[in-house]
Amino acid sequence: MRAQVDFDYYAVKPVGGDIQLGWKTLHEGPDMFWTPRNGGHWVVTRAEDIYDIYRDDERFCTRFVAIPKEEERERKFAPAERDGAEHLDFRKAIMPLFSPKAIALLEEKARTLSVRLIEEMKPRGHCDYVADFAAKLPIAIFLSMMDLPLEDHKLLAPHVDAIARSPDHAAISRAFNTMIDYLDGKIAERAARPGDDALSHLMRSQINGEPISRDDLLSLSANVMFAGLDTVVAGLSFTTRFLAMHPDHRRALAQDPEKIPDAIEEILRRHGIANLARTVRHRTEYKGVVLEPGEMILLPTSLYGLDERRFDDPLSVDFDRSDKRHVAFAVGSHRCVGSHLARMELRVATTEWLKRIPDFEVADPDGVVARSGRLNTLSALPLRWPAAN
């Protein structure tokens, strides 16, 4: 039975300012449906199906991970949009960048940057958390990893945003090409002066036993850049919005920072971010629904965490919940390589914020701007706190 719903995932309406609750309304309908929007695609709404399709590489591939299809884009992200042995080669190339040792070295940089940003805004008693903190920290960490100028974040941020949220092929293509042109110039400069930074490491990589080609290097570098920016911005923003609106939860973490890692996992479960897709490889049947080759399936991570068939009382945030498993970083062979870096940034930023600004609130609920698309995000989060904090 081919259920059809007129649904545009770029236009999900927040419920009470909560974009994830806007997604939650899909649980009132079929477990799987077809929408004619954005070129036409499937949407699965239940945790079991989201999990199973993420892990099923035999029937579903990552040739396209965003809807609508970007058929005209010649260069694909690597490893995100590669499969099989090719995906593994690219994955191996970047894994050393996210090893426990590498993350430990980055942690002090993340802490120093977090403290500096917080101390700069603390005397004001207010901020737009997204613009003043969340949008600055991850890109500064990425640029530091790559040994690139920190001021370049002003150039890169709008293009990362376009790739994450625009449904327009032309806008995405322009943004992607701008990122590629930027990286191409930096690679040319670094070739003359290689070092111990992440970009130099990628330039020394081998793919299929051969030195990495310029095209593959650009695809790999762009993937590392994109994956390390917008997702963490969203994670920081949703975490801080929740804490601003729930003083008891906030005080519990301020009094016992050891709880912060578990708290972050629970907040990520409740506030899913990524809405990625898979492409049907060949004609197949999934739970009685016939799927044709090339059809796309949207896998909204927020619906995994909000599924009452999977979690008891899924709308409540319980830092002591025994089962906090989520799919914020996907599952299966394409599980996010940089998840440990993201978790470190979320932990460090939250710890340092609560240490310096333990009491804060949303300054203007109407000023909170939530958006859906390839990622669920907040693009504005006005906060205030006692200036003497």
Image (tube, rainbow, N blue to C red):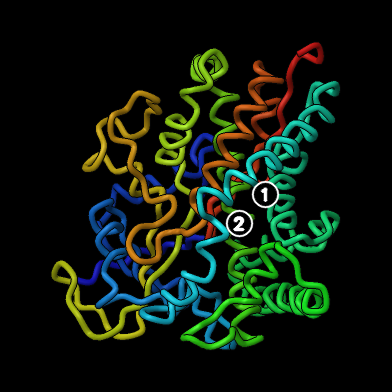
Is residue 67 in sight in this rendering? no
Instruction: Report which quarter residue 367 is drawn in.
Output: top right
Residue 40 in percent (x, y) is at 41, 76
Residue at 45% from the left image edge and 77% from the top image edge: 89
Residue 326 in percent (x, y) is at 36, 45
Residue at 33% from the left image edge and 42% from the top image edge: 325
In the orientation shown, which residue stands out farthest toward the left? 288
Residue 382 in percent (x, y) is at 72, 32
Q: Is residue 324 above or below residue 55?
A: above
| Comes first in the chain, label 2 or label 1 | 1
Horizontal arrangement in the rendering, residue 99 relative to residue 265 (left or right)? right
Horizontal arrangement in the rendering, residue 209 relative to residue 1 (left or right)? right
Tell me whether the residue at label 2 lies in contact with that at label 1, contact meaning CB atoms closer than 8 angstroms. Answer: yes
Q: Quadrant of the C terminus?
A: top right
Q: Residue 228: which numbered mark, if any?
A: 2
Q: Mark 1: which secondary structure?
A: helix
Q: Is residue 256 above or below residue 177?
A: above
Amino acid residing under circle 1: Pro
Q: Quadrant of the N terminus?
A: bottom left
Q: For marks 2 and 1, give the CA distance.
A: 7 Å
Q: Mark 2: which secondary structure?
A: loop
Amino acid residing under circle 2: Gly
Residue at 59% from the left image edge and 88% from the top image edge: 74
Q: Is residue 31 above or below residue 69?
A: above
Pointer 1: what residue?
138
Is residue 27 in sight in this rendering? yes
Residue 258 in percent (x, y) is at 49, 22
Q: Residue 238: which numbered mark, if any?
A: none
